[in-house]
Image (cartoon, coloured by chain):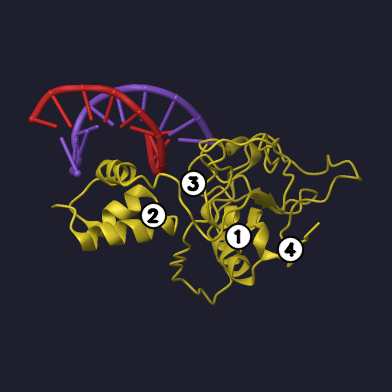
Chain colours: A yellow, B red, C purple
DNA sequence: CCCTGATTCGC
DNA sequence: GCGAATCAGG
């Protein structure tokens, strides 16, 4: 395969739309992500000029799990290669299962072997994230609801580096667990929860300040 | 381990 | 110019 005008155009288009090199490579076909990246550089468009260029504003949870995520903080003097945070990711949302039946907690419960985490919750705990219909994109919220139905429901101790750490339920009760679905690249949460946790600031009131 | 883009360098 | 291999990082 060679870089025909069409293919280059598509490359440029997708790149500027924020698609990843691997995604673009897949779309183009016949090339690897390396090829795409190489081309991108040769074309001199390593910097993605997109309409939406902004910081992300975390809008959610302070999970019981310590989260070192330090967001925002616009750098005063920024070089080109400085702030290259990931941009908004395309949201395919191929969630096909509108399961009508309530899939609560049907299965056998032989999980908790030694103890039963329960009553040890100091009263005045900071309210758990619980993504209430705050100012969250209804679509993303709907997706989250779906996802949560299929959550792994992991306990704190079962969490790993690549399980979604989004808390679900009330920590003060027995039905509390963590999402546990596979996280996406470095993020602490799965795709769905990331989309709820990190919103483009453009989504809401644009305080001109 | 998964993924991301960046760079190098033989072709 | 091309892109695999490698590097650097989340």
Q: Position of residue A93 (x, y in %)?
A: 47, 66
Mark 1, Cα crowd under 10 Å, few <14 / some 14-19 / many 20+, is few
For the residues bearing labels 1 and 3, Cβ distance under 8 angstroms: no
Mark 3, Cα crowd under 10 Å, few <14 / some 14-19 / many 20+, is some
Q: Which residue is mark 2?
A: A15
User: Seen in the image, is A7 located left or right of residue A127?
Assistant: left
Residue A206's disc is: 4
Q: Which residue is mark 1?
A: A105
Q: In the rendered image, which quarter is residue A42 located in? A: top left
Q: CA distance from mark 3 to mark 4?
A: 28 Å
Mark 1 vs mark 2: which is more N-terminal?
Answer: 2
Indicate the chain on which mark 3 is placed.
Answer: A
Mark 3 vs mark 4: which is more N-terminal?
Answer: 3
Question: Which marked residue is nearer to the observer: mark 3 or mark 4?
Answer: 4
Q: Which residue is mark 3?
A: A184
Please report the residue visible at 91 percent of the width from the left and 45 percent of the height from the top.
Answer: A123
Q: CA distance from mark 4 to mark 1?
A: 42 Å
Is disc 3 in the same subunit as disc 2? yes
Mark 1 vs mark 3: which is more N-terminal?
Answer: 1
């Amino acid at each position: 395969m060679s870089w025909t005008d069409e293919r280059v155009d598509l490359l440029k288009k997708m790149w500027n739309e924020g698609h990843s090199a691997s995604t673009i490579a897949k779309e183009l076909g016949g090339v690897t992500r390396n090829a795409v990246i190489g081309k991108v550089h040769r074309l001199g468009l390593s910097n993605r000029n997109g309409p939406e260029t902004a910081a992300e504003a975390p809008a959610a949870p302070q999970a019981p799990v310590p989260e070192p995520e330090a967001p925002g903080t616009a750098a005063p003097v920024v070089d080109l290669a400085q702030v290259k945070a990931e941009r908004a990711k395309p949201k395919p949302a191929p969630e096909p299962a509108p399961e009508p039946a309530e899939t609560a907690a049907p299965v056998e419960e032989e999980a908790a072997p030694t103890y039963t985490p329960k009553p040890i919750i100091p009263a005045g705990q900071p309210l758990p994230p619980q993504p209430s219909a705050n100012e969250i994109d209804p679509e993303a919220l709907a997706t989250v609801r779906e996802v949560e139905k299929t959550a792994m429901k992991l306990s704190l101790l079962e969490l790993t580096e690549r399980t979604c750490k989004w808390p679900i339920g009330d920590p003060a009760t027995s039905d509390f667990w963590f999402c546990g679905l596979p996280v996406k690249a470095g993020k602490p949460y799965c795709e769905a929860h990331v989309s709820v946790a990190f919103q483009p600031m453009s989504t809401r009131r644009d305080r001109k300040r």
